[in-house]
Amino acid sequence: MKRVTVILNPNAGNAHQRRAIAQGITEWRSNQGWQVRLRETRKAGDATSFAREEAKRNDLIVAAGGDGTINEVMNGLVGTDTALGALPVGTGNVWVRELQQSLNPLHAARQLADGHVELVDVGQANERYFLLMAGVGLDAAITREVHSADKKRLGRLAYVIKSLPVLWRLRGTRTRISLDGQPLKGNALFVLISNSRLYGGVLNIAYRAAMRDGMLDVCTMMGDSALDAPKLLAGILFRGYGVIQGLEYVQAREIEIACSKPLPIQVDGDAIGTTPMTFRVVPQTLRVLLPRTTEIN
């Protein structure tokens, strides 16, 4: 019998999605014979504490929420023998999209029942682990402005609306980046440090990223202001790294970033602080439950 705990963020999603999760749990119990416990978070950090506690007596911990909830849960599971599963109840659901898992929580639950477990790499930003990516500068500044109520009311549109004043104020910041000891300098607008490919569940920015290669993929956008953004964005879309001035793509195991003034940082969609910060890859340290048809790149 598989022992499972579902950690639910009750503030994520809607009543229909929560009913779908309840039905999925019922099917796990009746069809798979799984022993399933449900725990609801009440504040930031609960999901990590619950996951760390439940990992001692469970085979599987399922995060039911958005990418922030998944990040909290995986921070309690890194280095353990307990696997991470996910049921999509968030705004972006980037991890679920990365796995080509259904965005319907009930269908996703059925996929997990027939799934398989693999070991994957994770990234680490100082002491915080991340599953998908870390962002420095522009996207972290936008993330910092978007609150849970905004996402619940507006969905992804909240990010578009909040991005406008951030873009208006955007200026390049003198930045020194160390990539496995190799220096890169410039006026940074945005630095992406990625363990996975899909940015926001849509853009394939880190197109060479693989979650089992022991590397992080680093994409840098250098420029003076938001006026440089259209050129750099076009370069990303057409993979003009190393060709478009200010756009670079490098793979590294350890990245150190220091700036002339603190720049905001986000991991997996949650703001966590400012530069300076060190990022590194932790190879094959997290067990994840994947749909049967999904293979980690």
Image (cartoon, rainbow, N blue to C red):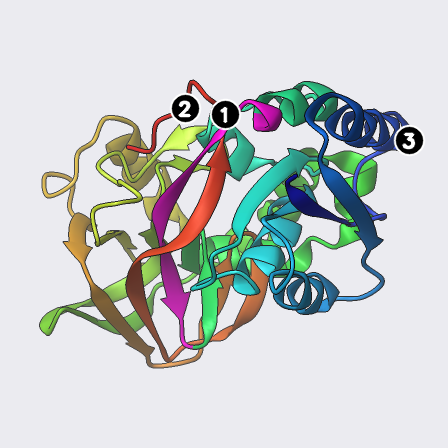
Residue 278 in the magenta stretch? The answer is no
Q: Tell which tag, 1 or 3, sits nearer the viewer.
A: 1
Q: Earlier in the sequence, mark 1 or mark 3?
A: 3
Q: Height in image: 125 above or below 134? A: below
7 horizontally vs 243: left or right: right
Q: Tell which tag, 3 or 2, sits nearer the viewer.
A: 2
Give neighbour class at mark 3: few <14, some 14-19, many 20+ (Cα, 10 Å): few
The amino acid type, in three-letter code, at marker 3 is: Ala
Report which residue position mark 1 lands on.
291
Point out the image quarter for the C terminus: top left
Secondary element under disc 3, as helix, strand or loop, is helix
Give me the disc on residue 15: 3
Task: Verify CB contact (< 8 Å) between mark 2 and mark 1.
Answer: yes
Report which residue position mark 2 lands on.
294
149 horizontally vs 103: left or right: right
* Residue 231 seen anywhere in this rendered image of the structure: yes
Viewer-nearest residue: 68 or 188? 68
Q: Main secondary structure of the magenta part?
A: strand
Viewer-nearest residue: 150 or 22? 22
Q: Height in image: 191 above or below 173? A: above
Secondary element under disc 1, as helix, strand or loop, is loop
Q: CA distance from mark 3 to mark 2?
A: 28 Å
Residue at the spot 54% in from the left edge and 32% down from the top edge? 96
Point out the image quarter for the N terminus: top right
Secondary element under disc 2, as helix, strand or loop, is loop
